[in-house]
Image: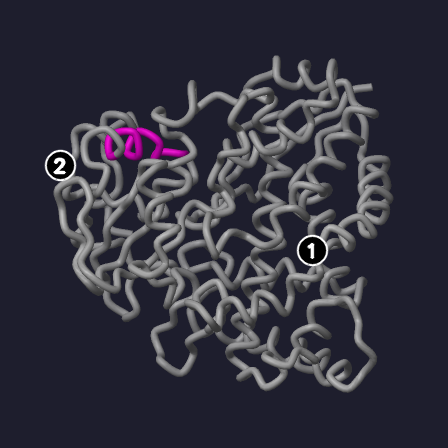
């Protein structure tokens, strides 16, 4: 990364307010590990809510289709994000912001990156896995595993909450959803990390390595597909795709794209919200005490934690026609980033938006799962896992103390944690 585009002031707020507006690029991943983006979002919401960035940071989540760096619009206010997210006739989801590749032969279609009607068909194929009836069936298994993990944690010694709790619980759930070999479930975490990583993260060394590992993912899941395509109907995602009338002839790269979508959606979002559960209630300890006193607050608290964290920071759209907003014109073909992380901290929508308030009256109005036809279809499963985690934590622990500031992703897309040392006292 060029030193010239790093923040050069000692204060993130100084950088945000002293830099000319047209030079601010919140997609720069180096702003994210230390959360230096918050004052930039605040300034954009107040001074330039539809912000044009003429040259986006070049990273794996770049906002253009091509190898080169492109321009994009940032939408940072809650109501504006809602207006774009629900207007799929003007704003297309094709292609998605994640997983562009320098070569045209490695484009990964996925249903979140499709417009109607194909989007609806593919989403409908896998939707039964998170039906209310299936969630009810899975809740006992989720609770059993949560109890097992929490009961195995060391007492009176430091450990990494991300590794021992967040990663463990989410990979178990993913393995169940795919009916994936349980002993090899950490492959799912690896593929999730690789799919959204660039060489600057240290997770991979090159784009070529990322592609090679994703082909390994495709090969592994193709074997599972072949085992199940002519087998009995089963309630796992691979069987549903392999046997679905509209998906059984899916192109291999489209299959891989949907796998990556399901892996990242089921892994990163829940994993990072589980870690945020502990981190946020350490920053706002009175909220932990509220929950200890009244466990009926847990469902609302989970919604508030998801709002406060916003595990995926943004999604992208492409304008299909000219569109006016705040006296400016988004031109046909322009790229638009809907910054969910900013919308969830919009002072116009949420009182004291930077605080965690577990009994917040409008916590469920968060937009972390998106809105409209692309709203995350697994949101109820994520909430269920978090609610059970909180219920079982409060039964066992007076407090989980964060020992030091967590390590965060070098990413402007996956807003999460790579390590967080904690201690449970007896």
Q: How many marks?
A: 2
Position of residue 220 measured from the top left corner of the image (x, y, whole percent)? 67, 77
Pick the front one: 86 or 173: 86
Residue 390 in which image quadrant: top right
Task: Give the label on residue 95, or none.
Answer: none
Q: Horizontally, is 274 left or right of 334 in the view? A: right
Q: 321 above or below 122?
A: above
Whether residue 42 appears in magenta in the rendering, the answer is: yes
- Lower position in the chain sequence, tag 2 or tag 1: 2
Q: Mark 1 points at which residue?
A: 130
For disc 2, the neighbor class at 10 Å (few under 14, some 14 to 19, many from 20) is few
Residue 217 in which image quadrant: bottom right
Q: Circle 2 sits in a helix, a strand or a loop, which is it?
A: loop
Q: Which of marks 2 and 1 is in front?
A: 1
Q: Which residue is drawn at 49% across and 36% down?
A: 366
Residue 396 in which image quadrant: top right
Q: Tell me the magenta residue range.
A: 35-44
Label 2 to label 1: alpha-carbon separation:
46 Å
Q: In which quarter of the image is the C terminus?
A: top right
Q: Which residue is drawn at 42% across and 61% down?
A: 98
Q: Horizontally, is 67 left or right of 325 in the view? A: right
For disc 1, the neighbor class at 10 Å (few under 14, some 14 to 19, many from 20) is some
Rendering colour mode? one colour
Prevalent SS, magenta region: helix
Position of residue 230 measured from the top left corner of the image (x, y, whole percent)? 77, 86
Q: 298 above or below 188?
A: above
Pick the front one: 16 or 227: 227
Whether residue 50 appears in magenta in the rendering, the answer is: no
Q: Name the residue under label 2.
A: 20
């Amino acid at each position: 990364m060029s030193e010239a585009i790093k923040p050069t002031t000692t204060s993130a707020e100084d950088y945000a307010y002293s830099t000319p507006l047209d030079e601010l690029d919140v997609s720069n991943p180096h702003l994210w590990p230390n959360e230096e983006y918050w004052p930039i979002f605040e300034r954009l919401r107040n001074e330039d809510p539809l912000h044009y960035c003429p040259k986006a940071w070049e990273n794996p989540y770049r906002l253009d289709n091509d190898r080169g760096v492109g321009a994009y619009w940032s939408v940072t206010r809650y109501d504006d994000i809602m207006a774009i997210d629900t207007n799929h006739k003007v704003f297309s989801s094709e292609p998605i912001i994640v997983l562009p590749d320098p070569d045209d032969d490695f484009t990964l279609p996925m249903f979140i990156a499709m417009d109607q009607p194909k989007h609806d068909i593919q989403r409908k194929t896998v939707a039964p896995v998170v039906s209310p009836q299936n969630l009810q069936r899975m809740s006992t298994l989720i609770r059993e595993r949560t109890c097992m993990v929490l009961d195995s944690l060391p007492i009176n010694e430091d450990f990494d909450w991300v590794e021992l709790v967040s990663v463990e619980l989410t990979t178990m759930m993913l393995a169940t959803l795919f009916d994936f070999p349980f002993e090899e479930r950490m492959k799912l975490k690896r593929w999730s990390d690789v799919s959204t990583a660039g060489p600057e993260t240290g997770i991979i060394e090159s784009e070529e390595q990322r592609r090679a590992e994703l082909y390994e993912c495709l090969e592994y899941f193709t074997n599972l597909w072949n085992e199940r395509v002519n087998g009995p109907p089963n309630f796992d995602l691979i069987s549903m795709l392999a046997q679905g009338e509209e998906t059984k002839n899916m192109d291999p790269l489209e299959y891989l794209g949907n796998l990556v979508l399901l892996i990242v959606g089921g892994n990163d979002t829940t994993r990072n919200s589980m870690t945020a559960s502990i981190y946020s209630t350490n920053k706002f300890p009175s909220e932990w005490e509220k929950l200890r006193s009244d466990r009926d607050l847990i469902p609302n608290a989970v919604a508030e934690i998801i709002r406060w964290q916003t595990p995926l920071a943004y999604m992208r759209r492409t304008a299909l026609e000219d569109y006016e907003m705040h006296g400016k014109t988004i031109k046909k073909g322009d790229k638009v980033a809907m910054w969910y992380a900013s919308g969830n901290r919009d002072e116009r929508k949420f009182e004291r938006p930077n605080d965690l308030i577990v009994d917040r009256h409008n916590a469920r109005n968060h937009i972390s799962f998106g809105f409209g036809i692309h709203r995350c279809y697994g949101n109820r499963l994520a909430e269920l896992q978090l609610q059970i985690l909180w219920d079982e934590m409060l039964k066992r622990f007076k407090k989980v103390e964060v020992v030091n500031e967590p390590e965060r992703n070098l990413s402007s897309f996956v807003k999460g944690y790579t390590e967080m040392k904690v201690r449970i006292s007896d």
